[in-house]
Image (spheres, rainbow, N blue to C red):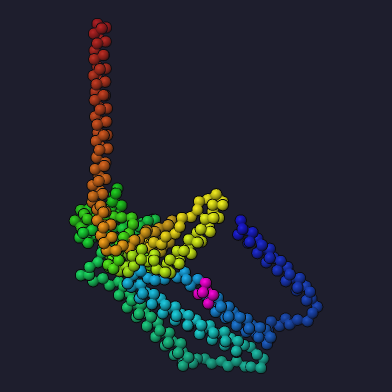
Amino acid sequence: MTSLLVIIVLVLLAVALWQLTKIFDLTQVGASSDDSQVASDNDNNVQGYIMFGFLAFIYIFTIYGLLKWGNLALHTPASEHGGLVDSLMNITWVLIFTVQVITQGLLYWFSFKYKGNKDKKALFFADSNKLEAIWSIIPSVVLACLILYGLYAWNNIMFVDKDEDVIEIELYAQQFKWTARYAGQDNVLGKANVRLIEGINTLGVDMSDPNSQDDIVVSELHIPKGKKVHFKMRSQDVLHSAYMPHFRAQMNCVPGMVTEFAFVPTYTTSEYRELPFMVEKVANINKLRAEKSVELVAKGGTALDPYTFDYLLLCNKICGASHYNMQMKVVVDTPEDYKKWLSEKTTLAQDIKAAAAAEKPAEGVEGVADTTAKIKDTVKAVVDTVKAAVAKVAMK
């Protein structure tokens, strides 16, 4: 309702300004005016100063944005390669900002300095090999350096040696949830296919594959600190994107193919919660939530729960109506806690057997019921036959 009132007020204000403009035009009837449509020196001066004003606005707003919202950017990375990604990003931002400051400053300065003047005559020239070389060679060299650095970073992040000791985990995406599958003791993920999805086997794991017998399926992702984790990603339906912002990790999940990403966590969840910037951030969030809770309770609503930081696996592709809610909690444990947590989980093969065993008693009960019904029907038929025979004898 408030938004509608604001829109109505703005529309009425625009109409009022339009009417004032018409009134002003009427007051100028009969006065001398320049209708030549040719810019005068005064017009050029005004436009020059306006352009300088706009340049100042750009710089002031940029600085204000950095001071106001700069703290909302991701802070300390929680993976070994995160520093490399942040370094590449910071270099890119510095270059972009430097080029923007120089080019915008020159653009508006030249527009002001060489503005139209009746006492000046413009000088035109077709080309300048020197200028062409400057603005072609310099960007090319800078972009080449950025691309080479990016390739170096990408290769370091994505390289996984075949003989390297890593933990194999599958991230399975579907609208609108994540599921994780651990490779188990053999550290080899069993084969899978969406055509094999049936009952409790929601990931379509091929249970005839020996490597599938120790696979573990969970809905909460646990990974150990200091150990490289090799993620293999699949999608059941549409294009998703596995995004773990604090680990600086993102990879598309494409239907019909397997993508991969690997990283080494450097902070456990409890350690990351204790970092000074995170303590301050959580305190600020809970302060805002407390203020909002007072407002909600006053209206008869429920107070908001206090916020606690957790790593999250998010979907970074708009995959449908509940895309915003597609997330999974990620817990980074110490190696000891991770082994303990994993040892308490049952394998998918055990879960399937348990589900099958639970169905058998139900089938047995149904079989007994069917047998009992058949016996009753048989007895009834015999009784009816005997009664009919007795009735015939009595009639004779």
- Number of numbered tags placed on the structure image: 0
**Height in image: 66 above or below 119?**
above
What residue lies at 22% left-to-right and 70% top-to-bottom? 164
Q: Is residue 163 above or below residue 348?
A: below
Task: Please tell me which residue lies in front, 387 or 252.
Answer: 252
The image quadrant that residue 45 belongs to is: bottom right
Magenta span: chief secondary structure = helix
Residue 360 appears at what percent x and percent y? 24, 40
Q: Position of residue 229 (x, y in %)?
A: 28, 66
Highlighted magenta segment, given as a residue range: 63-68
The residue that appears at 32% across and 72% down in the rendered structure is 80
Q: Toward the viewer: 275 or 110?
A: 275
What's the residue at 25%, 27% (across, down)? 372
Q: Looking at the figure, which quarter contains the N terminus?
A: bottom right
Q: Outermost residue toward the left? A: 210
Q: Quadrant of the C terminus?
A: top left
Quadrant assignment, res 120? bottom right
Q: Residue at x 33, y 65 (%)?
A: 268
Residue 296 image offset from top left, x and y in percent:
54, 53
Instruction: Tell me, yes or no, if residue 251 can be seen here.
Output: no
In the figure, 50 relative to 301: above or below? below
Q: Residue furthest right?
A: 30
